Image (cartoon, coloured by chain):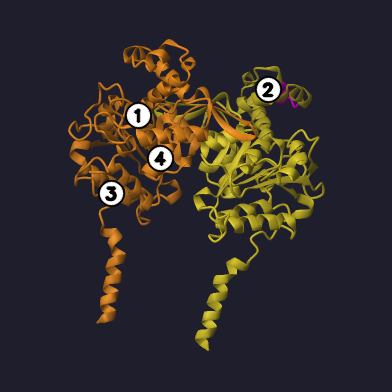
Chain colours: A yellow, B orange
């Protein structure tokens, strides 16, 4: 009897991980079922849709997909704070009207300068320092800065259901990648702590960079100027260059993710495209077609016909933040 | 007695992998000892030099380090063959003097055009097709083409001692990467079969690329023009962008690898820099300071003072090719 009891405990312990819900923060329903069904199909060696582990590539946008992006991309808030700090030390860094406006908090002028203005602010605040010094700056800011509406640290405004999805996929031998329009070095400053995604699995926009021995120290320096914008049609190009395989699972939230969704889900075999739809004004934010950040218009129109899963935050997520 | 015998067999089987020589094609001596000592130091949890598996990044140049590069980079031979083939179908592709000279086999004119000429030949033959179509072209060429001196397939001219080193490192939980001046998509066409290095761990030079839906098929296309040259000071920049960690082991063979050796071996903690020195005119080729490909001059002068390991092919390698 004792042996039988021991055996029975051992068996139930062994079975526990299989029975536990891998996505406890996802409400029961179509979204959750489609995700788990997909994962079961591609990981079951007996399934006609079986995919070998090396080809289990899952990619996710960051802003609005893994963490929040309202009222504006958090990286831009970092750039604005850093610009003010730089200007306080040396006003000579403010070499243009848009930089002077940004440092003075004149957002109307900044907005009027459009994308070129934003890129100038980001480039100015993200260059002329080593990659290590930049990472330290970004980490320092994340440790101190707080979101004006929620009062939360920015790297706490990550989505618990997506954290569970990332972990579930990795437990099932997927490799999880970030494919962000945000800056490569900025996202890397928190991706490992926040998402358990290592630096080599972060794809992002990049500024120019150079190598030199500076004061005896071999150094990679972030230089002014944009090298590659990892957005829209840039995303499939970057995924090809960095990963070299077409992902089988893609998550995004805006039309900036349309092309990578289109490209990845058009490959042979089983594919899952997923769009986080921000429908939850109470717990997070509600926006889509008319938003200045994370605009979702074409994706909203075409998701159904293309078989992409629209995740309704208000309906499909039992909670939003890890701290809840 | 029977139990004891079973136990004894089981123990010897378990111990076998520890006792087997992981580098059988390396002759006993300083080079082999320095490699195995380094690996033992960084993998022994009790060692002050212990490095956790995620930080065990090893990077290797390709041409002249993992496979041969004489009489000229194999990728250039592919480009020349492909140019002739393209010109036979449509002579209009020959839009410049250097392209016409290359198609006619006039190597003097091609050489006189220098690096710009080479890049034009490579760009012309490596663009205006999808990344998948290009991979098929490169694989088709590798399957058919033979080296004029050895008569071997090009992807058979890989170095057995380096294959053993790659495998040894992976067995010890290193991640192995290629950092090649050659083209990303060209190297990927054989890196998995030849070296067991997957596409996401290949870093190389890249041409421009774009994404579009072509005849209904979402497609990443290789376009004319150079996007990034992964050579010399470009190598540390690319390693930072792609891996985001400073490697602890670097292998190269030419001054094109100098900067990545310098950068990686200057990091904190244990580091190993390794240069394959082509000293073996009998079994492979002998060249260094005066060679047009794989020129090794500054590296040869400074390796000693910088503590980099100069691997003497003639002395340190028991065999060169896998087929021997």
Disc with the residue nearer the chain's start (3 vs 1): 3
Q: Which residue is mark 3?
A: B37
Disc 1 designates what residue?
B74
- Look at 27% across and 67% down and name the residue there: B12
Please report the bounds of the magenta region as a residue range: A99-105
Report how far apart the C-alphas of labels 4 and 2 lie in the structure.
40 Å
Q: In this rendering, is residue B134 above or below A17?
A: above
Q: Callout 1: 10 Å neighbours few (<14), some, many (20+)?
A: some
Residue under label 2, please give it: A116
Measure the alpha-carbon separation of dots 2 and 1.
Answer: 42 Å
Tell me the residue that label 4 is attached to: B191
Q: For the residues marked 4 and 1, what is the alpha-carbon distance in whole angstroms?
A: 14 Å
Looking at the picture, how far across and down is residue A98, in whole percent? 71, 20
- Is residue A135 placed above or below B84 in the rendered structure? below
Chain of the residue that carries numbered disc 4 in the rendered image: B
Taking the image as shown, residue A254 lies to the left or right of residue A93, namely: right
Quick one: quadrant of the C terminus of chain A?
bottom right
Query: Between marks 3 and 1, how big is the CA–CA gap?
Result: 34 Å
Report the front residue among B307 and B222: B222
> Label 1 near label 4: C-beta < 8 Å?
no
Q: Nearer the viewer, mark 2 or mark 1?
A: 1
Circles 3 and 1: CB atoms closer than 8 Å = no
Above or below, B213 against A61 in this view is above
Q: Report if residue B102 is visible in the image.
A: yes
User: Which one is closest to the eye, mark 3 or mark 1?
Assistant: 1
Going from the N terminus, do you reach mark 4 or mark 3 first?
Answer: 3
> Within the magenta stretch, is there residue A102?
yes
Tell which tag, 4 or 3, sits nearer the viewer. Answer: 4
> Can see residue A318?
no
């Amino acid at each position: 009897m004792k042996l039988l009891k021991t055996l029975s405990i051992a068996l139930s312990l062994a079975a526990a991980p299989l029975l536990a819900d891998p996505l406890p923060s996802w409400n029961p329903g179509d979204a959750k079922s489609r995700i788990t069904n997909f994962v079961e199909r591609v990981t079951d060696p007996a399934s006609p849709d079986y995919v070998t582990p090396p080809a289990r590539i899952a990619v996710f946008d960051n802003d609005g997909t893994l963490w929040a992006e309202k009222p504006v991309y958090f990286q831009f808030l970092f750039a604005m704070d850093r610009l003010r700090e730089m200007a306080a030390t040396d006003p000579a860094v403010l070499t243009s009207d848009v930089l002077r406006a940004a440092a003075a908090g004149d957002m109307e002028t900044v907005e009027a300068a459009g994308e070129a203005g934003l890129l100038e602010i980001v480039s100015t605040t993200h260059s002329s320092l080593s990659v290590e010094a930049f990472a330290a700056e970004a980490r320092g800011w994340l440790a101190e800065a707080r979101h004006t509406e929620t009062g939360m640290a920015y790297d706490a405004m990550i989505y618990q259901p997506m954290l569970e999805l990332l972990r579930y996929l990795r437990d099932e031998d997927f490799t999880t990648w970030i494919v962000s329009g945000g800056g490569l070095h900025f996202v890397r400053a928190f991706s490992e702590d926040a998402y358990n995604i290592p630096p080599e699995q972060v794809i992002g926009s990049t500024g120019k960079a150079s190598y030199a021995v500076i004061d005896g120290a071999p150094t990679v320096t972030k230089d002014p100027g944009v090298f590659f914008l990892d957005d829209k049609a840039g995303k499939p190009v970057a995924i090809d260059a960095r990963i070299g395989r077409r992902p089988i699972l893609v998550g995004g939230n805006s039309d900036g993710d349309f092309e990578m969704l289109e490209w990845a889900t058009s490959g042979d075999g089983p594919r899952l495209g997923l769009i986080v739809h921000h429908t939850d004004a109470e717990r997070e934010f509600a926006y889509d077609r008319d938003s200045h950040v994370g605009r979702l218009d074409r994706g909203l129109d075409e998701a159904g016909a293309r078989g992409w899963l629209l995740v309704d935050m208000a309906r499909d997520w039992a909670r939003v933040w890890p701290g809840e």
